[in-house]
């Protein structure tokens, strides 16, 4: 809610990467709840000595332990209007403009993790012995690893295709 030269922010956010360690964030807020996506704006919020701001619990995750994921809450947090990033009501469009790049980054991380998992599994199965042979020598192991390698390679090829389409301006985030 705008109050003179400030916005008054109330609400909470969950699954915020680096939320408990961030000093400054870009916060997506509803400046016009009746306008749907056109009512979203982005505010730069300095969390240091920010009255009404609280970090909730840090969530347990399966991976990416170097980056905490937490809950953030805002109770009558006052943010200067000068901290509006872009124009009021343009936040959703601003976020969507970077959606393709964000998805490509996530895809690159996933493709790299898949290949690493396959490589480590191949290494392990070549070293591990059972019944006088390495696990790698068993036919079922070879079939399973071949399928895993095919999925990893296909994912990288698809990612490369998506990057190429993006560089040509043809990758639509809705696809």
Image (spheres, rainbow, N blue to C red):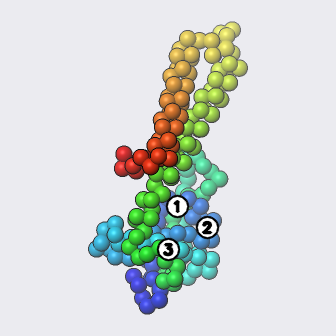
How many dots with numbers? 3
Element at label 2: loop
Residue 102: x and y, percent? 50, 52
Q: CA distance from mark 1 to mark 3?
A: 19 Å
Mark 1 and mark 3 residues within 8 Å of each other at the beta carbon: no
Residue 4: x and y, percent? 43, 91
Mark 1 and mark 2 residues within 8 Å of each other at the beta carbon: yes
Asked whether residue 60 is in view, the answer is yes
Residue 133: x and y, percent? 67, 10
Viewer-proximal residue among 23 and 130: 23
Q: Residues within 10 Å of mark 3 (few under 14, many from 20)?
A: some
User: Farthest left residue?
Assistant: 34
Viewer-proximal residue among 67 and 152: 152
Residue 11: x and y, percent? 43, 73
Q: Residues within 10 Å of mark 2 (few under 14, many from 20)?
A: few
Question: Which residue is identified by label 3?
Answer: 85
Q: Residues within 10 Å of mark 1 (few under 14, many from 20)?
A: some
Q: CA distance from mark 3 to mark 2?
A: 18 Å
Relative to residue 4, is residue 66 depicted above or below? above
Q: CA distance from mark 1 to mark 2?
A: 10 Å
Question: Residue at point 41% right, 46% down?
Answer: 170
Question: Residue at point 59% right, 12% down?
Answer: 138
Question: Residue at point 50% right, 74% down?
Answer: 85
Element at label 3: strand
Q: Quadrant of residue 51?
A: bottom right
Question: Residue at point 55% right, 37% down?
Answer: 111
Question: Which residue is identified by label 2?
Answer: 22
Left or right: 34 with respect to 19? left
Element at label 1: strand
The image quadrant where one finds the N terminus is bottom left
Question: Which residue is identified by label 1?
Answer: 16
């Amino acid at each position: 809610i705008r109050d003179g030269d400030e916005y008054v922010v109330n609400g909470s956010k969950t699954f915020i990467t680096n939320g408990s360690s961030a000093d400054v964030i870009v916060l997506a807020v509803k400046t016009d709840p009746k306008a749907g996506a056109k009512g979203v704006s982005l505010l730069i919020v300095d969390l240091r000595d920010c009255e009404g701001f609280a970090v909730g619990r840090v969530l347990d995750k399966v991976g990416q332990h170097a980056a905490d994921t937490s809950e953030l809450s805002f109770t009558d947090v006052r943010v200067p209007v000068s901290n509006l990033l872009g124009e009021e009501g343009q936040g959703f469009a601003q976020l969507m403009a970077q959606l393709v790049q964000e998805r490509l980054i996530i895809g690159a991380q996933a493709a790299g993790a898949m290949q690493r998992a396959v490589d480590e599994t191949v290494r392990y199965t070549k070293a591990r012995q059972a019944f006088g042979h390495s696990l790698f020598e068993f036919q079922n192991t070879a079939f399973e690893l071949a399928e895993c390698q095919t999925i990893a390679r296909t994912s990288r090829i698809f990612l490369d295709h998506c990057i190429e389409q993006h560089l040509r301006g043809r990758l639509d985030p809705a696809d």
